Amino acid sequence: MYSYSNITTLRSDLEKGTVSAEGLTNETLSLIESKKHLNAFLEVFADSALAKAKEVDAKLKAGKAGRLAGLIVGLKDNICYKGHKVSASSRILEGFESLFSSTVVERLLAEDAIIIGRLNCDEFAMGSSNENSAFGPVLNPLNEKTVTGGSSGGSAAAVAAGLCHASFGSDTGGSIRQPASFTGTVGLKPTYGRVSRWGLIAYASSFDQIGPITHNVEDAAILLEVIAGADEYDTTASQKPVPAYSKTLGENKTYKIAYLKDCMDSEGLDPEVRKHTQAALDKLAAAGHTIVPVDFPYLDYLVPTYYVLTTAEASSNLSRFDGVHFGYRSKEANDLESTYKKSRSEGFGKEVKRRIMLGTFVLSAGYYDAYYSKAQKVRKLLRDKTMEILNDCDFIVTPSTPGTAFEFGKNSADPIKMYLEDIFTVQANIVGVPAVSVPNGQHSNGLPIGLQIMARPFDEAGMLNLAAKVIV
Ligand code: GLN
């Protein structure tokens, strides 16, 4: 069995001939089969992956292989790949096949990555534990009694269990970073607009970003270089040139780093997570960085603002799933109204329905001002306050999550409790700044703890440089 360490080493092993892309792909396919019980994959793309692997081996021989030659990657089941099924882990997309590839997939294939399959997630990326998938939860490979986090749970589990070298998720409020934190992997949410959303099934369009989950910071930097950049199909994708993130890793810079006192003092924070976060800050101080405690009096407004705005956007985005255009149609549909009503009632799961109803409510004529437009104003306030901190300091550091991976069912009865899992991650999406979660030691319960770093818009280079320094 090939022991994967990083993209650079993989490339030199492939060039030396100690491994082949086809050999690696076959090995990975057997490993996925032997770990089926984790439920990380919804589907394995064995045929197209093996065909690509053969093509990559030939290109390697001819000296024409792309930067990601032989890298085996998995896709969250909301990222479109032409000719392959995609379902957002929902029954409503049953049988639906992508008609085109997302820009991210196009760019990965152009650099010769091998796409091995689609990964389980919370339905329409709504959830923090992967318990909302129509196809069952994903087991955390580090402790199978606990969740992987969500919504990109399959993406995190697949990397942690070695079922692919890297994976891609989407992050609307923490869905890359929280599962990364629960599985001891690196999870990167880029600046809003850094990566094209073309071909990503939308949840909340002004929050969503695609990003990688990897074993290390260097791989995250290389993958971001490949997927980032302007895209004619997504007008929100920035025209800013893409820096060579992997080249600036290891730069010897000293930074001014803020931490939010309100986060560190928050009631729900596990004391051991607090201790490890403090230890990371102490280590950075000892290395010559300046650490500044700052006030962020709006912590309690983050989750409500997030849930008003994202559900509003979701209610609009998900209106297209109507039993006519895509996938599932109720067997009992016999006219237009029953087609809509029955297909949607049968096709969507409980959490998705809750959010569509909540979003429709906050957008309704009588409540629009009280909820939706108010939340937009709070979003502006949160952005101004966050940018005020980031004008003075290079980064903001927080724990990624209040605790470690929890047991199945623990938060299921109380949606608010589940929503509070996202208290530290939603800020970056509300504001649009980049954020990364890196492993920050182990809890006495044996599970990993994550540290989050947020940066100024488009400063992924600095953020990843710091991330590489703190990783434990
Ligand atoms: N857990 C959050 C939610 O349920 C975040 C989801 C995400 O980032 N896609 O909405």
Image: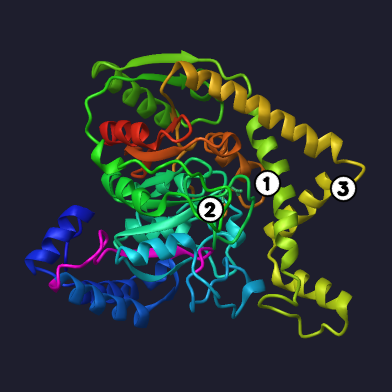
Q: Nearer the viewer, residue 312 or 246?
A: 246
Q: Secondary structure at mark 1?
A: helix
- Which residue has dot 2 on it? 129
Q: Nearer the viewer, mark 2 or mark 1?
A: 1
**One can see residue 260 in this view:** no
Q: Nearer the viewer, residue 381 or 41?
A: 381
Q: CA distance from mark 2 to mark 3?
A: 30 Å
Tag shown at residue 310: 1
Q: Secondary structure at mark 3?
A: loop
Circle 2 residues within 10 Å: few <14, some 14–19, many ≥20: many
Q: CA distance from mark 2 to mark 1?
A: 18 Å
**One can see residue 432 in this view:** yes
- Magenta stretch, overall SS: loop
The amino acid at mark 1 is Thr
Q: Is residue 72 magenta?
A: yes
Circle 1 residues within 10 Å: few <14, some 14–19, many ≥20: many
Circle 3 residues within 10 Å: few <14, some 14–19, many ≥20: some
Q: Earlier in the sequence, mark 2 or mark 3?
A: 2
Tag shown at residue 364: 3
Q: Is residue 363 magenta?
A: no
Q: Which range of residues does the magenta coloring cover? A: 61-80
